[in-house]
Amino acid sequence: MGSYPFFKIMGNQPQDEPSSDPEVEVAHEKEHHIILFNDDVNTFQHVIETLVQVCDHTYEQAEQCAYIVHFKGKCTVKTGDLKDLVPRCTLLLEAGLSAEVV
């Protein structure tokens, strides 16, 4: 992701220093998610183990995500920077799960 210039505004004159306010910076960044989808192929145990390994979930987190996917059809399993999520999503796909980064 490219960086954005952030300016503190004093009156109507922008200053050249970047903003130190993290809320201002977050407003300009797009957050990405890995969405895991339900399928009729993978077992709960395989999904849970894969989420623990690939997404750094605890066993309990992975188990909750597996149940959400089972009953709701999909679940956000990881949120963050695109550079981090794409390789993780690739590993989920290689493990036979259905997932995408949005």
Image (cartoon, grey):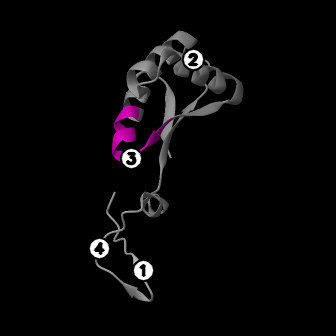
Sequence-first disc among 3 and 4? 4
Residue visible at 34% across and 71% down in the picture? 5
Q: Are marks 1 and 2 in contact (CB under 8 Å)?
A: no
Indicate the secondary structure of the residue bearing disc 4: loop
Indicate the secondary structure of the residue bearing disc 1: strand
Q: How far, Cα to Cα, is label 3 from label 1? A: 30 Å
Sequence-first disc among 3 and 2? 2
Q: How far, Cα to Cα, is label 1 from label 2? A: 47 Å
From the viewer's perspective, tell me whether residue 99 is left or right of residue 13.
right
Horizontal and vertical percent position of residue 15: 33, 81
Q: How far, Cα to Cα, is label 3 from label 2? A: 24 Å
Q: Residue 9 carries which label?
A: 1
Q: How many residues crowd around disc 4 within 10 Å: few (fewer than 14), some, or many (20 or more)?
A: few
The residue where tag 2 is placed is 63
The residue where tag 4 is placed is 17
Q: Does the magenta stretch include residue 26?
A: no
Q: Do the residues labelled 4 and 1 touch (CB within 8 Å)?
A: no
Magenta range is 78-88
The three-letter code of the residue at mark 1 reads Ile
Q: Which mark is residue 82?
A: 3
